[in-house]
Amino acid sequence: GQSLEQPSEVTAVEGAIVQINCTYQTSGFYGLSWYQQHDGGAPTFLSYNALDGLEETGRFSSFLSRSDSYGYLLLQELQMKDSASYFCACTGTDKLIFGTGTRLQVFP
Amino acid sequence: DAEITQSPRHKITETGRQVTLACHQTWNHNNMFWYRQDLGHGLRLIHYSYGVQDTNKGEVSDGYSVSRSNTEDLPLTLESAASSQTSVYFCASSEPMKADTQYFGPGTRLTVL
C-alpha cells in the first residue's frame, strides 16, 4: 500500500519561515508533489521533485530525499495569504496519492 | 483560456437516488481523475481515466462509476447514493505521464440525506 504522513497543523507569524514535512511509504515511486488549497477552493499545484535535492520557486522551496522517503515544503517570508492547507502527494504510475494535509495558519 | 469545470457546484439528494456529477475540461488532457475530500482524509482517488474508453478504479471506488466517451468529459455516477458519500468531489486532469501536475476543477459539494 501507499501512505504519506504530514503534520496536521502548523502555525507561524508573518515574515517567518516554516517547513512542512512529509514522509511516505509507497511502491512505484516517481516523485513528490506539493499542492496548496485555500478554504473553499480547489487544490493548486505548487512544486514537484523527481530527483533528490532542493527545488526553488520564488518564496517556496521543496526538498526530496529518496533514500529517507522524506520531503519537505519550505515557505519563506510568510504572508497572510499563505494561510491554507498544503498537501504532499506521491506520483506513481501516472496518478497521485495524497497525504492528509497540513493546515498552515499565519498570524500577524 | 483552458479550464476545467464541474457541475453542479452544490447538490442535495436523498439516499438511494442515482446522482451524476459532471466534469468538463478544455485542456485536451488525456488523463482525468475524480477525488473525494473529507475532513481527516485528504484527497482520495475514486476513479481515473487515461483516455477515451479507458477507466480505472481508485482507492475508494465502491458505489461509484465513470465512463469516458470523449476527451473532454468524465462524468461520475453514484449508483445509489448513501449518506457516507456526502463529501466534496473534485475532478482533475493532467497531460500523459505528468500526473504530478494536475489541474483541479472548483469542486462539487454533495449532501446525501
Image (tube, rainbow, N blue to C red):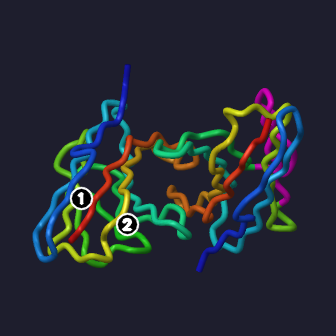
Chain bearing mark 2: B
Q: Earlier in the sequence, mark 2 or mark 1?
A: 2
Give the amino acid type for the residue marked by disc 1 in the picture: Leu
State which quadrant residue B47 falls in. Answer: bottom left
Please tell me whether the stretch drawn in magenta is mainly helix, strand or loop: strand
Residue A93 visible in the shown view: yes
State which quadrant residue B82 falls in. Answer: bottom left
The residue singled out by tag 1 in the image is B76
The residue singled out by tag 2 in the image is B46
Residue at horizontal 70%, vertical 74%?
A: A25
Q: Is residue B102 magenta?
A: no
Chain bearing mark 1: B
Measured as percent of width and height from the top left, residue B23 is found at 27, 45
Left/right placement of residue B82 relative to residue B105 reads left
Give the amino acid type for the residue marked by disc 2 in the picture: Ile
SS category of the residue bearing label 2: strand
Residue at horizontal 36%, vertical 53%?
A: B50
> How many angstroms separate mark 2 from mark 1 (CA)?
9 Å
Measured as percent of width and height from the top left, residue B16 is found at 12, 76
The region drawn magenta spans A51-65
SS category of the residue bearing label 1: strand
Q: Is residue A3 above or below residue B76?
A: below
